[in-house]
Image (cartoon, rainbow, N blue to C red):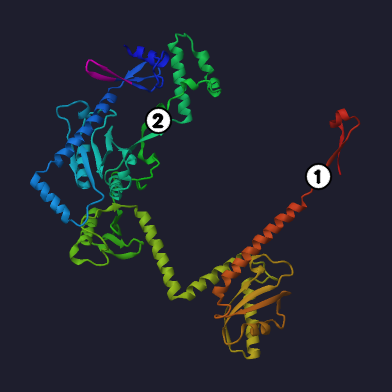
Amino acid sequence: MSLEDIYTKFNIDHPADFTGHSLSVSDVVVLHQDGENTSHYVDSVGYREIPEFTKELSVSAEISTEKDAAREETAEIPAEAAAEHTAAENTMAEPDNDKVSYYVIEDLSTWAENSPEKSRLERFESLPEAMAKFTEYRGKETEDKPDMARAILGFSVNGSEFDLIHVRNHENCLSLDFTHSKAAEESSRFMEDLQTLNHEVGFDKVRVHREMSPEEIKDFVKQRFEYQLKSSGLDDISLYMDRFDALYGQGKMEHLMPTANQKHIVEDVPFTEWENPYIDANVREADRVETELAFRLADRYISIQEATEGYDYTIYDMDYRKLDGGVYDNPDITIRQALDEIVTDLKEPAHRSSLEGSIRTDDELIPIDYDGLIEKAEQAAKEHLEERIRTEVPEAVESKVIADFKARTEELFNPVNGQTQEDIEMSVYAYLQSKIDEYGMDIELVDMAVTGSRCRGLEEPVSDLDVAVEYRGGENEDTLFNAFNEAGFTIGGVKVDINPITEGKTGTLGEYLPGVEAYLEEKRAALQEKAAGQAQEEKQTVVTLTVAECGEFHNFGEYHEG
C-alpha cells in the first residue's frame, strides 16, 4: 500500500470500523517495511520524509532501557556488602529525603544512528561534576546534524528521571519535562540546581508545548481546504479559495478543523522570550566580566563586588540585616576565587559562631540577583534605623510628623490678609507670650501649627483660624484655653481659635496632628460628595417644541425653547 493509498483510506474512504481522526496536514505516518521504519510528514501537498522523527522514537525507548541498565548495575551489591550497607543504614540518624543525582550523555544522535561508538550514559552524584562533564562534551567540535539532540544533561529526583538540557543546533535547549514531575516540583534541591544551571551553564532556548492560536487554526484549515481542492483534480481552485474567508466565518469548515492532538504545537522559543515562572529572571550574560555577585548559602546571604584594592563583601542574615563584611584585599585573583575563600572560611567547623548560622560543609551556593539583594538590604537597614529612632529618639519621629503636616499646610493654605501660615504662627506666638507674661503663668511654649479647615483650603468665608499650641507646665488645658481666647484675638479680621495641648492629656503636637489630618480628609471627601450631589440637582431637562403648519412635514416647522 502506497502513502497516497493510506491518505485516501484514512482521509476520504474511512474503513467501517475506523474511529480515529482523519489523516491530515501535520500528521506523521510511520511505515514498517522490510524490517525498517520510515517516517513521513503529511504536507499541504503530498508527503515529506522526516528521518529524524524515526530516530527520536528509537532513542526515547533506548534511553529508558539504558537508564534501567545503569540503575541495575549500581544496584548489584555483593551479599556481604549489602548486609553491611543495611547495618549502616540502621545506625544512621535520618535518611536523605531529597535525593538528587545527575546523568550526562555525550552525543544522543549516536543512539539514533545505532553507531558502534554509541555514547554511554554517565551518572554523577555531584552537580559540579555533571556540569563539568556536560560542558566538556558541549564544547567539542561536532558535525552539524540539524534539530538532532547532541549532548544531554538529565536529573534523577527521588526516583523520577528526566532530561533537562538538550544541545540542539549548538544551543542549550531547556526541556520542560521537569514540570510534569511531582518529585521535581517538591524538591527544593532540584529547584536550587535549576538556578545554578541557569547561571553556570545558561539556557538559549526552551522547548515549549502550546495550543494553536485562532490565526494558526485558520491557516491550518485553509491549507487542508486547498489540498482537498487540488486532490479533487480541479484545474483552477482560485475561485474556491477566494471564498474561503466567507465560508470559514460561516462555520462551514468544521470538518477540516484540527483535532486536539493537531492543535498541540511543540516549538523552541528563545529563553528570554519565555514566560518563565521557575528560574530567576536575572538573565545570564555570556562572556561578561563579573564585577558583582550575590548568593544564598544556607541561612545567610553573601554579596561581593569589585573594590579599589580587591573585593568588598558583606554577609547578611535571612532578614537582610548586615552581620559582617570587609575588603578581601587581593586584586590579583578573580571575584570567584575571592568568593570561594570567603565561603571556605564560613564552612570551617573549627570556629563556629553566630555569623555562620546553620552553614554546613556540604551546603552549595545558590545564585540570586545582586541588585535585588542590595535593594532589600538597604530597605532592611532603613527600617532598622527607623526602629531605633522610634525606640531611642522618639522626638525625631514627632518632628517629622510636624514638619510633614506644616509642609502640606504651606501647599494648600490660602493667605489671610496676605499672611502665610508662618506669619500667623509668629503672630500667635507673640500674642500668647504677652498673655503668659500678663498672667505670670509658669509654662513654656513648645511649638504650634495652623489646624482646622483653613490649613487644607477647605474653609468657608466665616471659618475661624484654628491654631494648636503645645506647651509644658503645670497649667490646666481648659484654664489656658479660656485665658488665651477671652480677648477674641483676630488676624486680618478673622477670629483666631487657640487650642492649647500638652503631653499627658491631649498629647504632644506630633501625637495630635495625625488625628487632625484624618478628620480633614473625611471633611474633604464629604464636601466633594456634597458638591457632586448639588451639581446633579442643578441639571435641568430641556424641552424643545416644534410648531409647523402641517403635521406631515413637521420637520419644516420652527423650534422653540420653553
23 vs 39, nearest the viewer: 23
Mark 1 Cα shell of 10 Å, populated few (<14), some (14-19), many (≥20) = few
Q: Residue at x 67, y 58 (%)?
A: 528
Circle count: 2
Residue 334: where, in percent of width, then height? 23, 53
Q: Residue at x 62, y 91 (%)?
A: 440
Is residue 188 covered in magenta? no
Please, which residue is most extreme toward the left here?
80
Disc ID at residue 50: none
Q: Give the spatial CA distance, label 2 vs label 1.
A: 61 Å
Above-or-below relation of 434 to 113: below
- Type of residue at label 1? Val
Mark 2 residue element? strand
Please, which residue is most extreme toward the bottom here?
440
Q: Which contiguous range is marked in magenta?
A: 29-38
Above-or-below relation of 514 to 288: below
Q: Is residue 136 left or right of residue 561?
A: left
In the rendered image, is residue 330 in sight? no
The residue carrying mark 1 is 542
Mark 2 Cα shell of 10 Å, populated few (<14), some (14-19), many (≥20) = few
